Amino acid sequence: MSAIDKEAIEAVYKTLVKSLLKKDYATARALYVEQGAYVKADGELTQNEIELNAELERFTDIIANMALVKRSIHIVENTALVVVAWHWADDKSDSPELHKAIDVLQKNTDGEWQFIIDNPMGL
């Protein structure tokens, strides 16, 4: 795994968080391949543009209250599996419940990383 690719993937997540906090859904949506898939809260996969946009909007309520704990990035050629551990930022318990997002990203022909599958609530 190249350090440059890892940094680029980290930047994708930073851009996603920043754009969602600003409710800039066009910038957030640009981080997905054209037929990118999103796993909705009910576990169903959608590639529908309207549903994806609605899910990104819904997720802004969550992301404002999220603390990322760590990220694990595994890259094979132009595909990356990313696991992000996170918890609710306002959970002040000694051991806050961890959640895991599981995502698949792909490097496009321009060298940019984009989401193929975004599963923010993990399994």
Image (cartoon, rainbow, N blue to C red):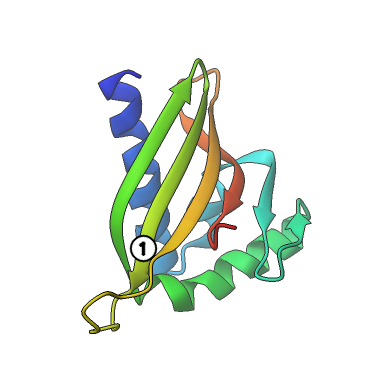
- Nearer the observer, 84 or 22: 84
Residue 36 to residue 65: above or below: above
Residue at 28 percent of width and 22 percent of height: 4
Residue 35 to residue 75: above or below: below
In the picture, the quarter occupied by the C terminus is bottom right
| Residue identifier under label 1 | 86
Label 1 neighbourhood size at 10 Å, few (<14), some (14-19), many (20+)?
A: many
- Nearer the observer, 89 or 53: 89
Residue 107 to residue 69: above or below: above
Q: Secondary structure at mark 1?
A: strand
Q: Residue furthest front?
A: 95
- The picture places residue 72, in percent across and down from the top left corner, at 36, 40
Count numbered badges in the picture. 1
- The picture places residue 114, in percent across and down from the top left corner, at 52, 37
Disc 1 residue type (three-letter): Trp
Q: Quadrant of residue 41?
A: bottom right
Residue 43 to residue 15: above or below: below
Whether residue 63 sits left or right of residue 51 in the image: it is left
Residue at 55 percent of width and 24 percent of height: 108
Q: Quadrant of residue 34?
A: top right
Whether residue 55 sits left or right of residue 96 in the image: it is right
- The picture places residue 40, in percent across and down from the top left corner, at 67, 64
In the picture, the quarter occupied by the N terminus is top left
Q: Quadrant of residue 9?
A: top left
